[in-house]
Amino acid sequence: MSGSSPWLEEAKASIAEAHAAGRMPHAVLIQAAAGIGGDSLATWTAQLVLCTARRPDSLAARSRSGQPGGGGGPCGECVSCRRVAEGQHPDLTAVRLGEDSQQIRIEQIRELCAELALTSHQGGYKVAIIDPADVLNRFAANALLKTLEEPPPRTVLVLVAAQPSRLPATLTSRCQRIRVRRPTRGESLAWLEGTRGPGDWNDVLDLIGEAPVAAASLDPAAVGTLRAEALRTLGEIRAGAADPVQTAESWSRSELPLRLLCLENWLTECIRRGLGASAHAPELRATTHSPSADSVINTRALFRLLDEVRELKVALAAPINRSLALESLLRSMQA
Ligand SMILES: [Zn+2]
């Protein structure tokens, strides 16, 4: 992640201040919506703690002297900082979701705790990143709680979670919570243009939401094409001119999450139009791809469909028959 991310600055400042003052908590819980850079803030925190170029003493001195930057940050250039960025630092352990797994399991946490109990290679801190932490299963969370209750000296655990409420309060209460605010549209656009260059980023963000880091992994032109094609197909399905079975099959084969977002946005737009008409809402944002007024299905059915799309999005990674679930959803859209 490059470029300036002003929406992370407040969080960075509070972590750096605690670190500089020698009050670095044993456990930090970074609360950040998906796709806005919670992972890069976790990496930055690991760099801060493991950086060998800026010692805490000099940071504290700088902080006391009132120089800008408060607690300062990691240099980003020393061997330690570079190894952390590459995920190769011997005193940094990262726990992530395994392939095809929806949970972080107790074995992963046991391994982590055993690793944290060892002496650090560099003679300083040991750092663990658990990302995403809100998918710790119950057993894993219990195992982690033991370590949080009696943390080995000079260890820092960094948990990243979009929905910390999914974690037991016994666990979250042991962590210092750092909330990352959502970027504004202007910040997202500036960051995307700085990181990825010019493009129709506004359209990408309209589709996926205010998640610039997630947007950066997409190609705006390809997203535009996909969106236009998905909306055309949805119109055809409504008119009985496209086959839900074929559509479900082809959608399931590629870019299903993006296509479901198109469907979700399409339904939301239908609902807004329907509600707008009845409530005389003066302003409805018209887009070139808005469903036409005559395609407005009854609002209750639309809400039901919207619920189904959202359920399908959540279930996406689970081993369900995506094509079948999508097919039944598309079928119920037919006029
Ligand atoms: Zn450094």
Image (spheres, grey):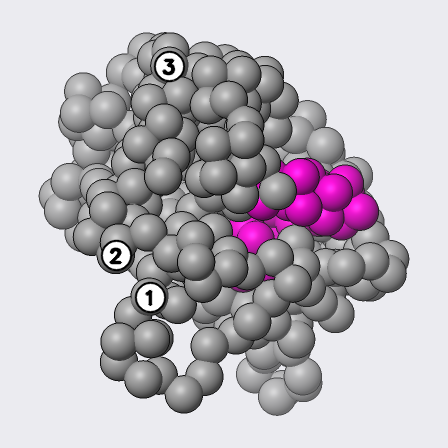
| Mark 1 and mark 2 residues within 8 Å of each other at the beta carbon | yes
Q: Earlier in the sequence, mark 1 or mark 3?
A: 1
Residue 54 covered by magenta stretch: no
On the image, the x and y values in percent for residue 202 come to: 68, 64
Magenta stretch secondary structure, dominant? helix
Q: Is residue 42 left or right of residue 321?
A: right
Crowd band around label 2 with a 10 angstrom C-alpha radius: few (<14), some (14–19), many (20+): some
Q: CA distance from mark 1 to mark 2?
A: 7 Å
Region of the chain picked out in magenta, as a range: 206-231
Q: Which secondary structure lies at badge 1?
A: helix
Image mark for residue 299: 2
Residue type of the residue flagged with mark 1: Gly
Residue type of the residue flagged with mark 2: Thr
Q: Earlier in the sequence, mark 1 or mark 2?
A: 1
* 16 vs 204, nearest the viewer: 204
On the image, the x and y values in percent for residue 90 come to: 62, 25
Residue 214 covered by magenta stretch: yes
Q: Quadrant of residue 80?
A: top right
- Residue pushed farthest right? 197
Image mark for residue 274: 1
Image mark for residue 324: 3
* 237 vs 45, nearest the viewer: 237
Q: Which secondary structure lies at badge 2?
A: helix
Q: CA distance from mark 1 to mark 3?
A: 29 Å
